[in-house]
Amino acid sequence: MSASARPPADAGSRSAAHAPAAVMGTPGPDGRFGEYGGRFVPESLVPACMELEEAFAAAWADASFRTQLASVLRDYGGRPTPVTQCARLSEELGVRLLLKREDLVHGGSHKLNNVLGQALLTVRMGKERLVAETGAGQHGVATATAAALLGLECTVYMGELDTERQELNVFRMELLGAEVRPVSSGSRTLKDAVNEALRDWVATVDRTHYCLGSVMGPHPFPYMVRELQRVVGDEARAQCQALLGGADPDVVVACVGGGSNAAGTFAGFADSGARLVGVEAAGGAAVSDGITGVLHGMKSLLLQDEEGQILEAESISAGLDYPGIGPEHAWLAASGRAQYDKATDEEVLAAFRLLARTEGILPALEPAHALAWVVREAGRSIPKGSTVLVTLSGRGDKDVAQVRELLASGDSER
Amino acid sequence: MIALEPWLRERCRAGRKLLVPYLMGGMGEDWVEALQAVAAAGADAVEVGIPFSDPMMDGPVIQQAGVHALDRGATPARVVGALASAELGVPVAVMTYYNVVFRAGHRRMAQSLRAAGVGAAIVPDIPLEELEPWAAEADAAEVATVLLVAPSTPEPRVARICARSRGFVYAVARMGVTGERESLGNETTEVVRRIRAVTDAPVCVGVGVSTPSQARAVCEVADGVVVGSALVRRLLEGGGPDAAGEFVGQLRAALDAG
Ligand SMILES: Cc1ncc(COP(=O)(O)O)c(C=O)c1O
């Protein structure tokens, strides 16, 4: 990389070129992470994926793009986010717990990191419209936010069932100027919203960018979204080192739906000695329960039946209800560099309440999975006295009504 | 088994325009009868969908047919098994998505198609770069893998796709998913022209071809048409084998008159 192309120091910029190629480096032109990844899309979309791959590579090597993104993340998004030491909860668990506070990003989750990068790239590519899929609505809201900021049109596909479950987020997106299209095909949830967004993209690719919400889909999306989220891990690594006298945490934990907040976090620690752990919802654990297959343009681990029909994931957090996992996670699991486990709905609710009471933070139900795993494993697979970093990928305001209902029905069952 | 490519080439040479109707395997009680009616009404080959839960390339009509088929318990083995005994008298191509093939295993799927007398397969979400694991097994089983060229496909890629396509070259009429369209634009003519420039294989146009007059117009440049949603919609509306055969008869007449 030439000196002029070197990204600015504040851009979360330990670029992939500097990491060992084998661990969370840049995939080759086939977009593979070991056996996983690739670009399994109809011919109509292959040229668009290639165009995007080139456009992102050029932008990512362009210092001015990095600077532009870094300043929007700072002045609009509120980065860098802090790492918070949890005194009371650490005391209770017997491990030193640190939280990377993505709940404090504008909009309330890490989703904005990815979306701002893709929206700036859209403008750079000369396109004027974004389409996105959303499950619970977080990625849809983030995309609508970035579209409003940059003056782009925005269409968000959302499963009909999810539009009913998350009415308020539908309204939020509309307030932000986006059009929300309910998807009534298939299981009427997130995976069907992805299908519909892809179908829209095929027909409108001249002027539209598909702003995919996680480290999934055809190459270059899994790589690109990981790079756009690595700001989480890069910041956290430096912050931990400052706190820990130059040391890394012993364990780094993040929840995994498609896997973007985990991939961004892990990217910062891939070349450290930290144990990396991704936590899936027990009802949608693609690593534990999935089988290798091809969906949404990627080869990865998928929940599917004997005939290859895709099954649905189901948990209390719509943001984790995806029947697959990003291909790089499938590879990190296969290679052993990261480990994946699951948390049940009950454990998650308990962790949600625990963090609220001991630290005054309401986590989103998604990262409450990561916390739940730490609560369960502290003193077991996490030795007492260890330092544990958890990425708190979002705030829990969106989940308060649901948690109230769940707790009420839990009480009445007792 | 009737091998697809020699059969189609022979008919092209005789001056006939090719008609390839599509329907979804297992979409209704009488789907095999509908297929037989379609074959008898003047199809030169038939394309049969094996349903997949997440059909990325398909619009609402074929999606719905797939849901019906899955709800009725359609599996790859059942659809292929029914084709084995359907006695259609024309070549058969199956159309499905890669996960169905991958889950079954490349070799097992290729051999089961061969055993059922299915001479061709269309799997639109395997791009050229990822084709070999499947295509090697399909070639070995003498199952023709038909590849798609899209309006967006750049020039050098068109040639590479055409060189690897077997049976015929599938020209995608427009950017988008399957579904009926009022009109087909210049991009259809253009994609056919670009394919013609690099191959002498038969070129059939699909995705959006919905009426006899569209079929005829397309065949002024192409060798044939694939007609899916317009036929499937008639079946979903309860038309049954008679309506399916009648519609295909109209398409045939339009092509023969052109
Ligand atoms: C707060 C939060 N965390 C995590 C996720 C899961 O996504 P990913 O695994 O891509 O980080 C979501 C998805 O909606 C989310 O809203």
Image: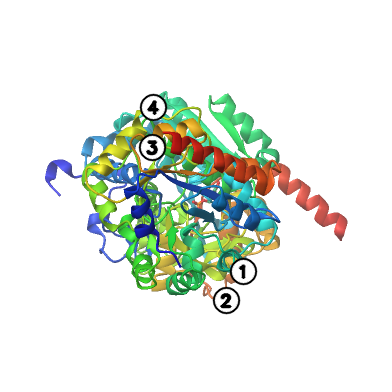
Q: Amino acid at mark 3?
A: Cys
Residues at badges 2 and 1 in contact (C-beta under 8 Å)? yes
Badge 2 and badge 1 both on one subunit: yes
Choose top left, top right, bottom left or bottom right for residue A237: bottom left
Task: Name the chain under label 3.
Answer: B
Which circle marks residue A376 in the picture?
1
Whether label 1 lies within 8 Å of ligand 1 gets the answer no
Determine the secondary structure under disc 1.
helix
Q: How is the image coloured?
A: rainbow
Give the class, few, some or many, for how many residues have Cα within 10 Å of label 3's Cα (few <14, many ≥20). Answer: many
Residue at left offset 33%, top offset 36% = B221
**Which circle's residue, 1 or 4, is located before the other in the chain?**
4
Instruction: Report which residue position mark 3 lands on.
Output: B219
Instruction: Report which residue position mark 4 lands on.
Output: A128
Q: Position of residue A156 (x, y in %)?
A: 53, 35
Q: Position of residue B54 (x, y in %)?
A: 55, 52
- The answer for how far apart the CA atoms under marks 3 and 4 are is 36 Å
Q: Position of residue A196 (x, y in %)?
A: 53, 42
Choose top left, top right, bottom left or bottom right for residue B152: top left
Determine the secondary structure under disc 4.
loop
- The answer for how far apart the CA atoms under marks 1 and 4 are is 47 Å
